[in-house]
Amino acid sequence: MKQKCGIGLLPVGMNDVLFPLADKQAKVVEKILDVFQDFGYQRVTPTLAEFEQTLFVDNQEDLKEQTFRLIDPISSQLLGIRADMTPQISRIALTRLNEEPRPLRLAYSGDVLRLKGSMLHPNRQILQAGAELIGADSSKCDAEVILLILEALHEVKVDNVSVDLNLPPLLPSIFKEFKIEGNEADNLLSFIGQKDFSNTISYLKKISNNNEKILSVFELLLGAYGEAEDVLNKLDKIEFKGEALAEIKRLKEVCEILKENNPRLKLSIDVLENRGFEYHKGVSFSVYEINKGILLGQGGRYISSVNGLCGEPSTGATLIMENVLSVVSFEKKKEKVLLQSGVNFEKAKEIINSGKQVVFGIDRGNNGEKELIEQAKSLKCDYVYFKSGEIRSVF
């Protein structure tokens, strides 16, 4: 037997945003997007739903599993409601903006919808704001996006942050060098992903026949997390080759640029962290608020792709606005003035220009002083403005 929805009851993980949070949300998002635009990131607004075949590419299994689907009654085609906006930015860049000069810098904001929340993040409707740099592949571009996110957070007075750098392609490149494949590679990824370093070493000893070179490399790698300078010193002790060497070189360059531009930045590195960065192809990062340990946003290098088209090297970042808003202080509330019925609009604008809010009073047939004061209190006003020009505090 189906249960009826109660009046006003919303689906799990979805919430109305009411005042004053709705006002705060709109203002914070706008300030962040203004910073993106100041640095040349042009604003776009992707559609809420689109054909499933264009919504993500084949390697984005995590997004496919989180996507709401429905049948379009006009085309009879399967549609998906976006679970993340980055793939949509890729589609826009590679199709509608394919003739624009590169690198292409785009900014966006909007809600995404996911099938399931998590224990830590139960919401399924999530407000995102982000920036993508498409069509360029360099450490300067990687660092630019990180610095851009830090500047946007600074604009909304969120400065107590740290950046954790990751290198998702490093492990696959090392596996390739040592010819670790198939189930062996999958098992190692599982152990490392769970930070189960004891079983990682035990398993490596088993599959490598106690190969000292492999074991020494991984023993150093498993300790390569923490403060950035310390980690880079540890990585210098490993003789990387080929793709792995190129990735470490890129990581060092990004660190140098970040420290040069933001010497006080709290910067850490965990080269083996891969969770949440499955489709990333280079230096990736997470930004945290230090006091509460809240994840504010993530990003990194990836390939912008659309099925049937060649991809482009890209880097970008997405801010989780719910988390950002949780650490942004409310601006001082403007004082509110109740205007006695009959006060004209020009006088209302004059009071607004003085830095206050106004509310037009309602004529209830008895607009005596006492009644106006009570009306002002019920509407949470600080003052009453009388037609005579007198302004009086409610309290």
Image (cartoon, helix red, strand yellow):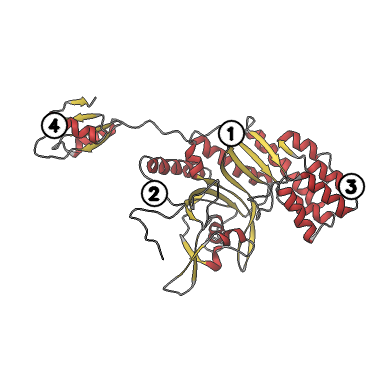
- Please tell me the numbered disc located at residue 320: none
Q: Report the residue marked by disc 4.
A: 387
Q: Report the residue marked by disc 1.
A: 290
**Which is closer to the viewer, label 3 or label 2?**
2
Please tell me how crowded label 2 is: few (under 14), some (14-19), or many (20+) other residues with Cα within 10 Å: few
Please report the residue visible at 57 percent of the width from the left and 51 percent of the height from the top.
Answer: 132
Earlier in the chain: of badge 1 and badge 4, it is 1
Residue 77 falls left or right of residue 169: left
Q: Amino acid at mark 4?
A: Lys
**Which is closer to the viewer, label 3 or label 4?**
3
Q: Residue 85, percent across and down?
A: 53, 55
**Which is closer to the viewer, label 2 or label 4?**
2
Q: Amino acid at mark 3?
A: Lys
Which residue lies most toward the left here? 365
Earlier in the chain: of badge 3 and badge 2, it is 2
Task: State how far apart marks 1 and 4 are (Cα).
Answer: 52 Å
Task: Determine which quarter of the picture holds residue 197.
Answer: top right
As drawn, 351 above or below 114: above
Earlier in the chain: of badge 3 and badge 4, it is 3
Q: Report the residue marked by disc 2.
A: 16
Q: Amino acid at mark 1?
A: Ile
Residue 356 falls left or right of residue 299: left
Q: Report the residue marked by disc 3.
A: 213
Helix, strand or loop under label 2 = loop
**Which is closer to the viewer, label 1 or label 4?**
1
Please report the residue visible at 64 percent of the width from the left and 46 percent of the height from the top.
Answer: 141
Please tell me how crowded label 3 is: few (under 14), some (14-19), or many (20+) other residues with Cα within 10 Å: few
Q: Amino acid at mark 2?
A: Asp
Q: Would you say the residues marked 1 and 3 are in contact, meaning their CB atoms lie under 8 Å apart?
A: no
